[in-house]
Amino acid sequence: MEENQANIVVFPFMAQGHIIPFLALALHLESKLRRLPNLTITFLNTPLNIAKLRSSLPPSAALRLVELPFCPSDHGLPPDAENTDALPYPLVARLLHASTSLRGPFRDLLLGLVAGGRKPLCVIADIFFGWTATVCRELGVFHAVFSGASGFGLACYYSLWVNLPHRKKPDSVEFSLPDFQEGSPVHVSQLPLTILEADGTDPWSLFQAPNLSAWADSNGILFNTMAEFDGVGLSYFRRKLGVEVWAVGPVLLSSKCRRSTTPSSPEQCIAWLDEKPPKSVLYVSFGSMNTITAPHMMELATALESSGRDFIWVVRPPVGQDINAKFDSGAWLPEGFKRRTAGRGLLVERWAPQAEILAHGAVGAFLTHCGWNSVLEALSNGVPLLGWPMAAEQFFNARLLEGDGVGACLEVARGRSGEVRADALREKIETVMGETERGRGMRRRAREAREVIQTAMRDDDAATRGSSVRALDEFIGAAMSRRAESRNGLKIPNGHASIPGEHISTTA
Ligand SMILES: *[C@@H]1O[C@H](CO)[C@@H](O)[C@H](O)[C@H]1NC(C)=O
Ligand SMILES: *[C@@H]1O[C@H](CO)[C@@H](O)[C@H](O)[C@H]1NC(C)=O
């Protein structure tokens, strides 16, 4: 019966920054794999996250949303804390640890599928769910990790966690990565807070060390990136873990789908941009999880004002405030800022239709936290970047983008510490947007990046299929040949042969 089915199980960590790229991947798989008979894509998550997706997703024939039981209060979390969005920073590590309680339900679900003759073709799971690789290996199910981060960024992040090099040289400001020379040196200002504070005995280290190492049990890693730019990071994982690596990106949520998962409507921003000359507007956004400090916000406002450039700025309350609270421009921006920049500056609270903005011809550059999804949206539209990385692997994304390989980014600041001066910011805005040699070079490189992406995603005819399309085919091919090899080979342990029915529900 199995050969008539293609069931792909996808399983992101419980954070919007993970769920959105997995959703994009699931919909991409659905559209690319139509030729597979009886394709189903089972999207696993905890009940509240599934409920939120069910109420916002457009109907899809192949996608099934399935709940795994999870009780936040069993783990000392608030009762509705099933997503990092609902949590203050110190509790994120607790959610991470709590998420390993999904191991039993996940294993039972796979056993139920196997027993029902519906063994998954593959499981694609989060970078934080290394334990899923161990479960899949035990049950003979093909497994891949999916990274929404760049290969280079994730390689630096992985190497930092498994080596903690800053702990071995506590007085230095620079460290080399013993197993990733290509990513060395790393400066202390590029360490995400969790790694900076890690000493091997803290909650993050205790989670990361064994769980990142468990990737060695996986069959490979799918990256939302392009092999043409990101080969160095991809080869780190081949070398380090001896697994396959497939660069299948960029995989992005269509704006139609994204809009239905977000509150406001894009019309205002787009109408505003329609009035502006080509390539004249600077778009500023630090993503939905980050904000800058109050003093940095003042400097940025002063820089935007004195630059004389048009801008759209997605504003959120500064560090120390509730990031989702109402924005108080009287308190956090220079006095009279809004009045003086009226007409040429548009402040948008919390959320803007980013994909549509970056696709608009009036946008000339993007000041970004270098979250990989934002980067992919910008490069897909040939928009050059001003980088202000904030957290996680964003510091290393900025380095990849600034380096010779891409050459479409200028880093302007790092994180929350360090000095940021308005005049230096203004100068860098001018470098990228103005008629400078560097600016012209960056704009050319950003256009070239767009071409590389279009070529990587070409799928019109077999002879010219792009690298990302071929990589996805190779991934599915590897999963299918594994299934062919292992058919009839798996013994099912007794007593686990049913799906826990009360937790299953589908979109259909
Ligand atoms: C889909 O699955 C059913 C049940 O296993 C099977 O009878 C049917 O042939 C499959 N369809 C295709 C196109 O293989
Ligand atoms: C992942 O981390 C948890 C700590 O929360 C640990 O109990 C578990 O064994 C780790 N998983 C693997 C595969 O080592």
Image (cartoon, rainbow, N blue to C red):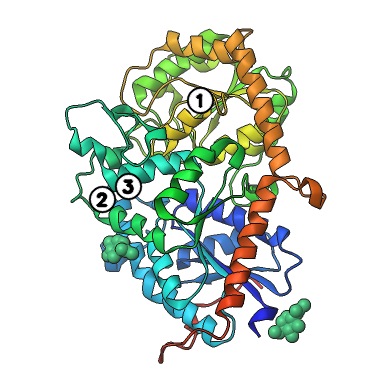
- Please tell me in which quadrant of the rendered image residue 437 appears: top right
Say which residue label 3 marks. 88
Q: Is residue 460 above or below residue 374?
A: below
> Closer to the camera: disc 1 or disc 3?
1
**Which residue does the image show at 59% across and 62% down from the upper left?**
55
Dot 1 beta carbon under 8 Å from ligand 2: no
Q: Quadrant of residue 473?
A: bottom right
Q: Which residue is mark 1?
A: 403
Identified by mark 1, the residue type is Gly
Say which quadrant the C terminus sits in.
bottom right
Position of the N terminus by quadrant: bottom right
Q: Amino acid at mark 3?
A: Pro
Residue at (54, 81) in percent of width and height? 113
Task: Give whichever of 390, 480 is nearer the camera.
Answer: 480
Image check: 200 left or right of 394?
left
29 lies above or below 504? above
Q: Which marked residue is nearer to the observer: mark 1 or mark 2? A: 1
Q: Give the quadrant of residue 353.
A: top right
Q: Is residue 27 visible?
A: no
Which residue corresponds to mark 2?
205
> Position of 463 compared to 384: left or right?
right
Whether residue 4 can be seen here: yes
Identify the residue at horizontal 64%, vertical 55% (top origin).
Answer: 472
The type of residue carrying mark 2 is: Ser
Q: Is residue 101 left or right of residue 30?
A: left
Q: Considering only order in the chain, which callout, 2 or 3, is on the residue closer to the N terminus?
A: 3
Q: Quadrant of ligand 1?
A: bottom right
